[in-house]
Amino acid sequence: MSTGDVVPVSEGLLLERESEDSYDAALPNSLLLSNNKARRDRIVSRVGQLVVLIVIFGSWQLLAQTKVIDPSFVSEPSQFFPSFWHGILSGSLLDLLGRTLFETFAGFALSCVLGLLGGYAMAEFKVVDSIARPFMTGFNSIPRIALAPLFVLWFGLGSLSRVVLIVSLSFFIVAFNTYAGLQGVHRDHLLLARALGATRAERFFKFVLPSAAPAIFAGLQLALTYAFLGAVVGEMLTGSAGLGGYMALEMGTFNTTGFFGALVLLIIVALVVSVAMRAVEHRMLRWRAAELHGTQA
Amino acid sequence: MSGGTVNGAGPTPGGGAPGRAVGSVTGASAWTFDVAISVQKLSHAFAGADGRAAPVLRNIDLEVAKGEFIAIVGPSGCGKTTLMNLVAGLEPVQNGTVTVDGHTPRVGDRNVGYLFARDALLPWRTVLGNAELAMEIGGVDKAERKQRAMSLIADVGLEHSTHAYPAQLSQGMRQRVAIARTLATTPDLLMLDEPFSALDAQTKLLLQDTFARLWAHLSSTVMLITHDLSEAIGLADRVVLMSARPGKIKRVFTVELPRPRSIIDLPSEPAYHRISEELWHELREEVTR
């Protein structure tokens, strides 16, 4: 601590900041240090991940090639990676992927709209919550995948049955997270809103919604994962379209190479989508990083 | 108030001699002063644990002049905060009358600013965003809002942390932001409920001084609730001492210290020690009762 603490300050009140400024001044240095460390950690983890990948596919290749495991069951990386690459270049896998992604995002978008509205209604109106809750909990405990054949019966073999399946999965996740987030607003903040004379809309948009944003975002991420899952599983069950349908077809003809080729694409897409979601979240919720990691914004 | 220490000029009300309750201003209508807060025959009770009414305040009479700085001290549970909540309109008046600027108190009155022990900063807003909050809700336009916020942020000494989030600030810095947020709308009445109680001793002194310096430029009436006697004497024109529950006004002290005061230099003032001793003597009777 510097001199600023006990110096009698009569007029030059500027002095008073000294003690807290030293705190401030210490910032850049520690930030620099932790930046360097963060970069080193990142390199280590990337290299580690690469090693794990090589070990997995290397031993897979080895075991399949030496016939320790029958390649007709597990294919082999030297076969399915080219199959994947060929599918990309010829565009056949991409067409299938297009259908799957369309269903995923249509279902996800619908789940978001309905889930956000549902969660809001439950948080805002106690009556809605008390009436709807047992039904929501009840329906949410059904394994929805088991309903897929029913949805096919009702909505046909096309994309619609998959979209319905996705909504039946994702809606609840969004709704429950939205509800929990909107309920979690700090009472000090509500008191402040009241004291400042905030209108109902101001209270919601300036106090309640921002505090609910992290919970809502977590819900959206999970819902997107489930939407993807719903689309692929729905396609597999009907065996008709999209990546899931193709994979079911390849499996039915014991073409494990084609199956794993499609699986590689599926994994890559899922990774890309989740990384993108996290980037969006990080951008929109920068303050959360400040909260979780202290001084590093 | 013979010392004439009320911020701003003009004759000031209040009991003549220290120790006389302020109910004596009834005859003061000839004076050219305006009453900011008027509390008459105010009694209040809460539902106790056994279902019976537990009295919290008993027969409170208090008038606060416009521009006056009044501090309320008393033992824990004496109803200080209840009194403030009633004046703020956060709780309905049960018995007696309370008027603020001649009207029934109303929550969300934009002429009233609050500062609490907990800063209630919004963690998703930067220092600047938090300083602008009250003005945003008060409908101040964007450019002016930013300009006023920036100048207040500089006033409280945070100009290097304008874009930091609350989580990146120390407790003292956070409370500085809360001060900026509160003063940004230049409220006519400031309600301070133990605003510095969560701070360490040094930070507290610095913030009290910052607040006193900024308040000197405003014409706001202040009602400060505190446990800290030196804070009360250092900042206020009058210190109201309340008795143990149910709270009554036990005595009103007029602080005849010249302004501008420096809280940090206070211990060198003989008058400070005199009031402090008297106040502590009477308060001790209540605390140990």
Image (spheres, helix red, strand yellow):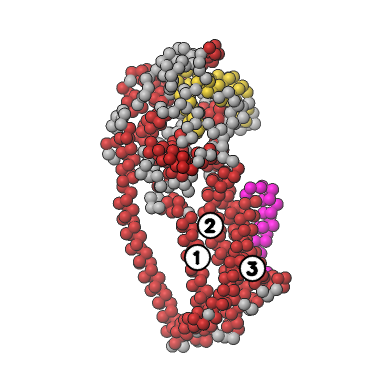
Q: CA distance from mark 3 to mark 1?
A: 20 Å
Any mark on residue A163, and which?
3
On whether residue A140 falls in the magenta region, the answer is yes
Q: CA distance from mark 2 to mark 1?
A: 12 Å
- x then y, percent, for residue A265: 51, 75
- x then y, percent, for residue A70: 50, 86
Q: Which residue is mark 2?
A: A217
Mark 3 and mark 2 residues within 8 Å of each other at the beta carbon: no
Vertically, is B69 above or below A102?
Answer: above
Q: Is A39 displayed left or right of B166 in the figure?
A: left
* Closer-to-camera residue (B200/B39): B39
Q: Residue at x 46, y 34 (%)?
A: B183
Range of residues picked out in magenta: A123-147
- Please, what is the three-letter code of the amino acid marked with disc 3? Val
Q: Residue at x 41, y 47 (%)?
A: B163
- x then y, percent, for residue B97: 60, 22
